[in-house]
Image (cartoon, rainbow, N blue to C red):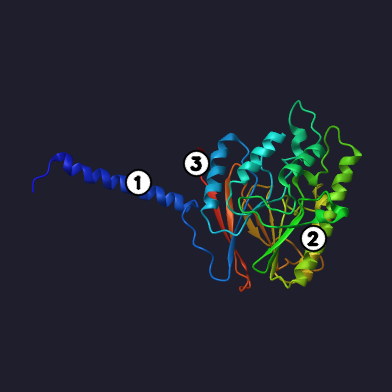
Amino acid sequence: MTRSHATWRRPARRVRWLALAAASCAVLAACGWSPEPPAPGGSFRFAVFGDGPYASNENGRARRVIDALNARPLEFVIHVGDIMWQQCTDAAYRERRELIERIRHPVIYTPGDNEWLDCVDIAFRAVDPLERLASLRSTFYAPADRSLGEAPILLETQSADPNHAEFVEHARWSHGGVSFVTIHAVGSANGRRPFRGRAPRHDEEVARRTRAAVEWLQDSFRAATAADAAAVVVALHASLLHEPNDPEAAAYAPIRDTLVELAIEFGKPVLVIHGDEHQYIVDRPFRDPATGAPIPNLQRLETFGSPDIGWVDVVVDTTLAEPFRFEPKLTPGWMWW
């Protein structure tokens, strides 16, 4: 049969279009946008993200992260803080909460330093970090015993104890035989760094919050042991790891030392999740103070941060000796819209 020139070209254009579509799908799949199968039987998935978006050109990627999370079979999402940069207003807090509430899974959020402590860095504004912390708590933790997200879950919080009523952000919950805990420890020396206008009440806040975090860790590990939990996951914003001569090391020492002691005593897998330093890392950097050897059951996950906008899928299978498997998902920089 004789065909016109136009008829012969049409299939070629279609082939080229299909090839381009296939290539695009391959790129998206490589970037974590492919449909994710449910976790194997007896296991579950959760996701971790934080430290962004900061700049306006990261907002599109943040929305894509949320769309991707919504398409995944997750039990919940943990946000490790730094939800913004130099936008320390009530309106900005509400805007970020509304963004997080678009996630169809439960979202448990622990604060970063950008949201309140570093607000003093905004030029030409007299900002009291403690006033910002109070506003942050009232915006993100009302009610205190519920997570964020479209399908919130019940949480236990330290604020249920009248002696620790202010610490609505110290939470815990359980899933699949694993105990999860959040504590409020942030970058910038956990609140100790100098700034103009610093007063004794700022030092008192750091000391009070650090003591509360230590007590919450101790109580949560006791609860995990009593429940015969298979593992414990601790989420916070700041890294607890600093060289001994680092002036910031002392700010985190009470929390770090308590965590190390509790993990050794617990004897089962413990995963520490944090952000702040903006790089994806999975390792075992904590060391036994008695021997100097790495603590084999204490693992660390650090998630991505600006300018990298992404998240980490964590697959948990408590039937395995190594119950945590990590699947990093980084959104490409060219996806800015």
Write the residue at 79% across / 32% down. 127
Q: Position of residue 293 (x, y in %)?
A: 75, 67
* Visible residue check, residue 121: yes
Of 64 and 140, which appears nearest the observer? Answer: 140
- In three-dimensional space, the C-alpha distance between marks 1 and 2, rounded to whole angstroms, equals 52 Å
Q: Which residue is disc 1 drawn over?
A: 20
Q: Which residue is disc 2 drawn over?
A: 217
Q: Position of residue 93 (x, y in %)?
A: 69, 39
- In three-dimensional space, the C-alpha distance between marks 1 and 3, rounded to whole angstroms, equals 17 Å
Secondary structure, mark 2, is helix
Q: Amino acid at mark 3?
A: Met
Q: Which residue is situated farthest in the left direction here?
A: 1
Write the residue at 83% across / 48% down. 166
The mark that comes first in sequence, 1 or 3, is 1
Residue 302 horizontal side relative to residue 74, left or right: right
Of 178 and 24, which appears nearest the observer? Answer: 178
Q: Are marks 1 and 3 in contact (CB under 8 Å)?
A: no
Q: Which residue is disc 3 drawn over?
A: 335
The mark that comes first in sequence, 1 or 2, is 1
